[in-house]
Amino acid sequence: MIKNYKILIAGVGGQGIVYLSNIIVEAAMLSGIPVSVSEIHGLSQRGGVVTSGIGLGEYCTGFYGKAGVDFLIGLEPLETQRCISYLHTRSSVVFGNYRIQPYSVNAQMAEYPDVVEFAYYLGKQCTEVAFIEHFPEEIDSVLYNVFLLGRATRMKDFPFKKEITERAIDSVVTGYYKEKTLRAFKLGLDYELNKQMV
Amino acid sequence: MIERTIKILTPHTSPHKTCVMGNEGIARAALEAGVNGVFAYPGTPSTEISEIFSHVNTFQSNPINQEKYPEITKDPVYFEYSINEKIALEKAIAYSIGNRSAMCVMKNVGMNVASDALMSVTYQTIGAPLVIVVCDDPGCHSSSNEQDSRYWGQMASVPMLNPATPADAFEMIKQAFELSGKIKLPVIVRTTTRVSHTKGIVTYGNINHEFGIPKFERLPEHINIPARTAAAHARLLDKLKNENVLELLAVNSKYIFNEHKAKHGIISTGVATTYITEILSQNNVTEKVNVLDLGMIHPFPEKEVVSFLKRDYEKILILEELDAILENSVRTIAQKNKINTTILGKGFAGLVTTGEFSIDLITNVLQDFLETDFSSTENITLADTEKYLNNLPPRPPALCAGCPHRATFYLLKLAISREQSELILCGDIGCFGLGALPPLKMLDTINHMGMSISMAQGLFESAHNSEKKQKVVALVGDGTFFHSGLASLVNAVYTRANILVVIFDNRTTGMTGHQAHPGASRLPKYHEIDIPPLLKGLGVEMVKTINPFNIRDSFKQLNKAMEFEGVSVVIAKASCIFLPDFKDKIDKKLKIAVDHNRCNSCANHEDALISCSRCYAPKNNLSRAKAKLISEISISGDEQLCPANICNHGFFNSIIEGDYKSAVEIVRDKMLFARTCSAICHRPCELFSTQNNVVPIKKLKHLVSAIDENFRDFSHPKKRTKNAIKKISL
């Protein structure tokens, strides 16, 4: 039995946040760890923010508060940045530089934050940070979520071993996409970070 | 989707653990309890429950599935999306009276609509079990209020269960069905967003197939007349004292962290309990407190609470989201039993009746209550977070790319000048309500479902005898129109209101995830109702259906409808982008290009470096767009030949609309010295025109550049210089 552990997935509606949380839930079920998830996806289809908090362990809920998240998977850099008050100094973060500009930025009413600078900041603050500045071209953008999960699996504090996560994908994903998904996972797993960014 | 349906229909003879969303657990529990029919109106956070039954119904009625999966398609569960919650509950009551067990599902505000049906059936009787599921939304993630539906238990005198987790919800639905059948009363299970939309481990079991045999008994209880109601009320209150009710109260009053004798006691209900258990165990203080979780909140578990109160606690804290319902009951019971323990609730350590609980809020409350500092077990926050959190661009929801509602709003923007007219636009609930937000800002009011048409009538009537008397516009979605707008429209016709109703008909109930409604049924089990003949039958004299993407024609129709005296209705009909009707029409390889022979705008955007559509003038110029729309002659873009790259069409159209300032801005967009330009230009645009009537561009330029005040505002040229590649000072 592991100590209570909280994973947060943040991004924008349509990026496959709920899908990713389903895979993690399956991994927990396969490991026999009690799991609970809290999702906010009220207006996901209208391009709103979607978050999914996953709690692992007895009495551990998917709700998260200040400095309460141990592992953050950010599918969109701005939404990753929005979550930093939930992180603590021993947290791990994996996030990708796939920007989805909100209306305010498109209408030039607000500026999109400097992602690279933010990545440096996070790198200094947290235990382990993996920043994917450029996703490999061979990956379809709909599979960036699984790619990030692959990269997460490789990190020191991620609660599931590679084999378990792979088995979870195998049982959650069905049909035509299974092979593609597993490939994206594998590519994420093998992805070497830009050394300067670590 | 089919796999999920099969999964939820598959019986398990031995306990099967699975991790599901609260709403999915509720649907499964109803199936296990042997529900025969489900009646619902969609609404977040309740929607997934009804969606599952919609899929189950479609799956079970398919002959191919019946052959392939005989086991899970036998005794199919009836399901319908009724037109509103009142009809859904009325039909569910009748279904139960016909001896078939029913479930009725809705969101918090839906219960208000359905309440008429609830309030008197309790005095009468039902037949087979009837369970009502109401999903509250503390924090208003997606609702027009955060009302506390727990009051309905007291108000209607029906048993009410209030689960804390998906597993609770699963058990309680089963309990509710059983109890309802025994005491012949509807039972309400009330959840909140954080129960309905939370995933947790639930243990699936077998599915009950003991379906009720349809029958109707002629009982005197079915006739509700005043002479009988007083006696019926007394009988109703007796039902709540029934032993089955008392038994369930005991089962659902659970002690947590009860191994140690503590000085502090907490009574909690709903999701508050999950926050408490996590925070107490995370901070290793479970020994300091005893917790009583109340899962059944009506009738009030008096016996259980009194015995908890008598355990000599120094202090007792009541934790419940929203109103102080539990707290007030506990205080009353304490007073009745002369218990003097300090009772804390709303008002203590930041506990308020608004919004939802959070880990941070409850952590603070528990620290204060237990007089213990949790900081030794807490994590260290990151440094300088403010710097990275301040000024982050917000991400509000917006209408989808390609949404037909955008086109309709664009039309309205052109037809109704928001700056120059006082015309009121009354909005309603639904996707198109997003039109209230910038950049559209095309709604003045949004209330509850169906209010738009009543609002327009009332506002029109209030100004009836004044000089301001003018048409008022109501905007309503197609789903909402059938939900409750139709009755209001009948009233408008009947009272001779002078209103325009625009129905945003995207062929589905969009906001809640594309459910059927009478105007767009899509399934053979429903009969589709065509709106125009319906309206004509009601006596609406002017009914126009427009395709909002055909802007020129729609604009004309909309203006005609505005001018019409009386009730006029415009149906802006184009399907939601998520529907197959929309998707099938789209050729994904299609690329957009400008046809210069038809373009009535500037061709200057071809010159990427001095792109005219990058700056202020063309973007925000609605008057120009309007002129373009009503112009009779169109001039090809490549005829402009302005050496200074000025958009002559934009310039000319702005003048037609009387917007001289925009006209000057369009010139200054490319040429800061508009006056000089008007003096020295050799007007190639006029010389090379192939049209019979030459537009005197140069004279016009002279005209507008003579207006001094239009030159005072330098904000736009200044803004442009920020992005300029080259800067020249003179």
Image (tube, grey):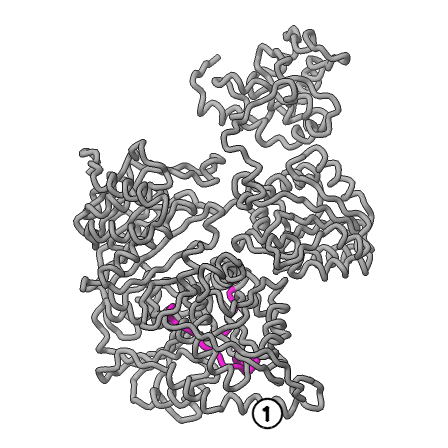
* Residue nearest the observer in this picture, B486 or A170: A170
Q: Is residue B119 on the magenta stretch?
A: no
Q: Please, is residue B501 above or below residue A33 in the view?
A: above
Quadrant hosting residue B196:
bottom left
Q: Please, is residue A118 above or below residue B330 in the view?
A: above
| Callout 1: SS | helix
- The disc numbered 1 marks a residue on which chain? B
Quadrant hosting residue A75:
top left
* Residue nearest the observer in this picture, A23 or B303: A23
Visible in this render: residue B564? yes
Question: Residue drawn at (45%, 80%), measured in percent from left and top?
Answer: B297
Q: Mark 1 points at which residue?
A: B234
Q: Which amino acid does label 1 sit on?
A: Ala
Residue B442 place in picture, x, y as percent: 62, 45
Quadrant hosting residue B712:
top right
Q: In this view, does B421 lie to the left or right of A187?
A: right
Residue B75 place in picture, x, y as percent: 51, 70
* Residue nearest the observer in this picture, B332 or A32: A32
Q: Is residue B168 on the magenta stretch?
A: yes
Residue B190 place in picture, x, y as percent: 47, 72
Q: In this view, does B476 lie to the left or right of A125?
A: right
> What residue range appears in magenta?
B146-169
Q: In which quarter of the image is the N terminus of chain A?
A: bottom left
